[in-house]
Structures are given as C-alpha cells and as structure tokens.
Amino acid sequence: MTLDDLRVFVAVCRAGSLSAVARELGCTQSAVSQHVKRLERETGVSLLERLPRGVAPTGAGRMLEAAAAEGIAGLDLAVRRLRDLADGESGSVRVATGATTVRHFMADAIVAFRRLHPKVNLEFRTESSSRACYTALADSALDLAWITLGAPVRGIEQRVVAELPWVLAVRPEDPLAGRERLGVRELAALPEPRLIRLPPNSASAAHLDAACAELGVRFAFDTGVADWDTALLLAELGLGRALVPGRPGLPASGAAGGGRLRLLPLPEIRPLRVGWAVRRWEALTPAARAFADVVATARAAAPVPPPSPHA
C-alpha cells in the first residue's frame, strides 16, 4: 500500500469513475485499476462496487476513503507548512471564497495584510457554495475557506467572524419604504410580496428557510438569482423586493445604493453567521493564521453606518 494508491483511490471515490481519474492523471484506466486492486489485496475486502455507469465505494471503501482523505490532507498541509517555515516570511495563503466575498468582506483586510506581510502570496479560489468550499478544503492544499456557517462537518472546524442581520431592500417609492421595520408574518401575508429568492442551493437560502420555519412563516418567491448582489440590483431596477443579509457596506436600516433602495430590518429572523472554515486551526501556517486574524479584526472594527433620517 502506497501513498499514491491511497490518493488514486480517494480520487476514484470522489469522481465515481476510473476512466475520469485516468484522464485527469494522464494514464490508462488499467493503471488506475491496479492501484485499487493493490489496496483490495492488502485489506482483504472489496473497496469498490462496479455500477452500470461508473463505480461507488462499498461500506469498507467509504471507511478507507474517509481515513485516507483526512490523512492525505494532513500530510499535504504539513509539507506546505514545512516549506513555508523554510521560506521564512514568504510562502502563500490559499483561500476558497464565494463570488463576491473578497469585495464585501476582505478588501480592507487584504490591503492591511499586504502591508504587514509583503512577501506572502495570497491565492483565492472561487467556489459556488459553502458545500463546495468544504470539498475544496478536504481535497486540496487550501488553507482557509470563507463560508456561511452551518451544521458541523466532519473533519472541518468553523469559526464565526460576523453575524449579518436580515433586511428587506425596496425602492423609495415602494409602499413599505416608510416603515422603520417589518414583521415576517406581515411580509408573508402581503397579497403580492414580490420577493427575490437567494440561490436555492446556497447556505444563506437554507438558513433563511430554517429561520422562517422556526417562526412558522413561509415566503412565496417570484424570482431566483445567483448571488446577493444580483438580488439587490434587481430590487434597484424595481423587479422585486430583495430579502438579503445586511452585508458590509449596507447600513442596518435606512438608505442604501445612493438612495436607490430602502433597507427595512427584519429583527425576528435570526442573523446569518459567516466566517472561516479550516481543517485544523492548530495546523495552519503562521501566514494563514495571520490572514484569518486580520480579516476577523477588520470585520470587528468595521464602522456601522448610522440609520438614515428616513428610517
């Protein structure tokens, strides 16, 4: 049993295909199969089930995959940390983020980190969801992932950096624009709420659905979007009302977007928690830990704009 055997086996389990892994590695399907067969001989159990299309790990295979993936990730991280220690104050920090995360949550922190650590290279990898960030952490040499925090994930540690209150973004001429705040039951009872839905597979949408279920409320959505910024843009264009987290740059209430939107707090909905996910905090390189701390400090020090006189 070799480390290459285990790496190939984990890749096959994730891809569900011997041929896909062979293409990725630039070798034959037979060569990939030999790695798996060697593991099966040494363990004495069947690790893969052959399906009409592809393969899937058996119960024993899932057990080995979980242990191998965790061990490989730990080894890769240790090797990177040793290299960074050898490089002194240089090295790199690899971060998985959402499409708009850097602009909204890290812009000031990146500038501050560059000043403190000019020789450290920052690398960002865009992922479509928190689930994709978890997978990226487990499957690659990434250090950190910025996520919407959710249920515990095996092999991943989560740390809260900010709690984002929910707001309803409406145009100034909207009948709701003069309100100081809005109750969720009142919003749900509107004959035409015209709500813009957050990405249905996103952690923020799941959080909103769960929080509303706790309150016994269910919203009817008219339009779906890919991210929070698009929801606000559609609201500015008058194509609906955006129910979104109050991300940095948005006041908790009052005017936003140069006065093109009014933001109404919905305090009954529990805030959305965002922050860092890592494999193990104590295993982070000094540079990665420093970057995580700088982002957290910047978020804690971010000024909260005062409410608009209109609110």
Image (cartoon, rainbow, N blue to C red):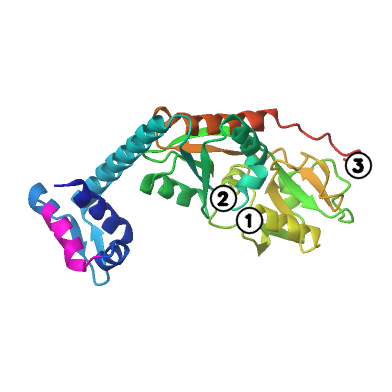
Q: Residue at x 41, y 38 (%)?
A: 156
Q: Quadrant of residue 9?
A: bottom left
Q: Do the residues under discs 3 and 1 have CB atoms within 8 angstroms?
A: no
* Pointer 1 or 2: first along the chain: 2
Judging by the rendered image, the residue that carries numbered circle 2 is 98
How far apart in space, not on screen, are marks 3 and 1 (Cα)? 27 Å
Instruction: Report the Cα–Cα distance between label 1 and label 2.
Output: 9 Å
> Considering depth in this image, is 97 or 227 the residue closer to the camera?
97
Q: Nearer the viewer, residue 97 or 207?
A: 97
Q: Looking at the image, is 197 positioned above or below residue 295? A: below
Mark linked to residue 227? 1
- According to the picture, the residue beneath numbered tag 3 turns out to be 310
Count of marks, rendered view? 3
Magenta span covers which residues?
27-38
On the picture, is 143 further left or further right than 219? Answer: left
The amino acid type, in three-letter code, at marker 3 is His
Q: Position of residue 159 (x, y in %)?
A: 51, 32
Mark 2 crowdedness (10 Å alpha carbons): few <14, some 14-19, many ≥20: many
